[in-house]
Each structure stands twice: as C-alpha cells, then as structure tokens.
Amino acid sequence: MITSALCAAHSARSAAGAGAMQAVAAAPSAGALERALAAAAAKPASISNASKSGGEFEAADWWEEHAETFALARSEWGRLHPGLYDLAANEADYIDPSLRAAVAAAEAAAMAGGPVDEAPLRSLLKPTGVAGVWRLQLFTPRFCAELREELDHAAASGVPIRRPNGMNRFGAILEAVPGGLGMEGAMRHLAHRYGRPLSQMAFPSSVGLRDADEHYGFVVRYRPGEDESLAEHADASVATINVNLADGFRGGRLTFKGTRFVDADPRNAPAAAVDFEDFAPGEALLHLGGHYHAAEPIQQGERTNMVLWLMGEHGVVRVAPYERGERGRTTPLRRWGGAEASGRWEALLRGEDGGVAGGRERDEL
C-alpha cells in the first residue's frame, strides 16, 4: 500500500529539486524511499541511456552502491500486484490453461517413471514460418495487463530502474539485481517449470541437462522517439523466450537469419520475419539464443515484450550441438521429471541408476 508519507516524499522529489532531496537524504531519520529519491536526483551523468552497445556497464559501481537502498525503497513504495512475484502460487491466474495442463500431465507421467507423451505439448508449439522459431501462448491476458501496470507503478515511485541490457535502453530488469524489480522467484519458477523443459524439447541437440539452469528476465519497450529498432545480434542465452505484452502497435517485426555454430554462414543467411502485430498478449516466441535476429523500426504505438534468457551455471552458454546418445542430452523423462527427480538424473549420468526408469532412459538416448 502507498502511504500518504510516501506520496509526500514522491511529490517532494518533483517540487523541491535535487538540492532539497539531498538535504533530506542527509537526515538520519530519512526513509529508504527518500534516500533513493535523493540518489536519483544526484545520479551520475554516465547514466544517460544513450549507448546502444555496452550500456549495461553504465555506472555499475553506483548501482551496486545503492542496491540495498533501492530494494528497501521499493518495499516501502509497495507492490501493485503482489501475485506477480509468486508465480508458483498464482499459475491459475497467469499461465495459459492449456499449457499448464499439458505440463502438469507430462510432469505426472515423468514422476511415475514414464513413458511421457509430449504430443500435447508439441501441439502447443506453432510454426512461425521461420525454421527453428516457434510460437506458443504462455501467459494469460491478465498477466500481461498486470505486469504493464506493475511497471508503471514502479516507475511512479521515482526509484531508479536499471536499463534491461546493453542494447535496449528502455524497459526494466525483473530479477533481484541492483536496479531490478525483484521478481527473482517468479522468473525462477517460469524458467524451471516451463522455459527449461520446453527449450530442451524444442531444441534437444542444443539445450541439454544443465544448459538452461539459470535465467535472466527483463522487459523491453519500443516506441517512436525512444528505442525504435534493434541491430542484428545473437542473445547471451542458449534459448530465449520473447513474450508480447500488448497490442495496438504497428511495425517492430523481428527478422531472423542463421544460427551461430550451427549454420555455415549465419549472418549472411536469407532473412525471414515474424510480426508481433499478429501475436495476442501473452503469446511468445521460443528460439535459440544463437539465432541471429534484429528488430525492425516501430511505426506507431508501443511494443512491450518480456524476455527470458536461459543459460547454464554462471551464465555459460553452450554452443556445441549434442550428438545423439551423448551424456547430458535430455529425454522426455529427464525434461519433465522436475526438481524431485534431479538426484535420479545425476545418478543416471554417473551410470549408477539400474532401475526400470533408468533402463528406459538409456534406450531413449
């Protein structure tokens, strides 16, 4: 809840100017929100959001210095939609029901020892017309609306929000990092229950057992006068989920070429486009992080997307394809076994699992 004191502090930021806010910050009794607003008023000139390359390093020390204050300030300001921060407890409201049911069925079959029928899940992955790029309904419209409202609410606090990555200047980091919004738990649940097994299923020769254990979630915004397009690049991920959050915009297509370490000359491959104008709110793209792509100019309105990057431990991105039968390559049982089965998969990789399920896994390799 936003108290009258917090509203007054926010109003003071606009009315009193930087000097007054610095004086407030010097007071021993100043709250975290007041201190955060003072820090925002005196932020370094290097935080200009001018760079479209390497911008993630802008004033990194300043973000680290104020990380705790900014996190406490967000807590004081309050959350508009608390359910967004606990996705595991609110899946019925936020995850598309067909996807949720298909994943639950696959998990139940895997925990029973299999076999796991992935046909219902594969039927939810729709072709885009671009080889290796899939579309699926991931979130409900309610999730999209509430996340947009939550971003507006966080911005209204005046607490600085760090740019999402080195190329995109406008948006927000959703993770619990300096300048992020603190949705770490929700991003972890999304990555582990949905993103990781879906990417392993869609790209079995590229995403293996430990290749998508970590995540980085953020929101990007394109509109005329701000970020209007994005240069060709590959993501810092093994797999990427890119979710459309809104409608009513024009332009901003994604164009894809080839995939690094897979295609012989990926950046000179013929381009093929996917148009987000055709996507409903909550509908997502799933593609390999190494698939080169670019965003064409936005023409009208605002395109807002939530992006989830998946990578291995310590941010490692595997680039070498798995051979069939290679240890570490996943199977349906491994993909959908969930955290409770991790010990069994570790034993299997060491050759210590002699059970029926273990034998079936070896047959599937």
Image: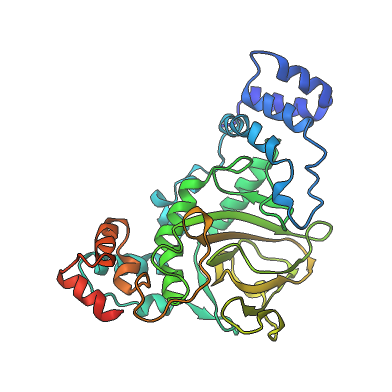
- What colouring method underlies this structural image? rainbow
- Tag count: 0
Q: Residue at x 42, y 80 (%)?
A: 123
Residue 124 visible to the viewer = no
Asked if residue 20 lies left or right of residue 352, the reply is: right
**In this rendering, is residue 225 above or below 253?**
above
Q: Quadrant of the C terminus?
A: bottom left
Depth check, front residue: 50 or 158: 50
Residue 78 in the image: x percent, y percent? Answer: 57, 34
Residue 71 in the image: x percent, y percent? Answer: 58, 34
**In this rendering, is residue 54 above or below 320?**
above
Residue found farthest to the left: 355
Depth check, front residue: 16 or 46: 46
Q: Residue at x 28, y 61 (%)?
A: 346
Q: Residue at x 37, y 69 (%)?
A: 328
Depth check, front residue: 324 or 285: 324
Q: Quadrant of the N terminus?
A: top right
**In this rendering, is residue 8 above or below 299?**
above
**Occupied quadrant, residue 153:** top right
Residue found farthest to the top: 28
Residue 324 in the image: x percent, y percent? Answer: 38, 81
Asked if residue 116 lies left or right of residue 56, the reply is: left
Q: Residue at x 28, y 75 (%)?
A: 116
Residue 356 in the image: x percent, y percent? Answer: 15, 72
Residue 185 visible to the viewer = yes
Asked if residue 289 lies left or right of residue 163, the reply is: left
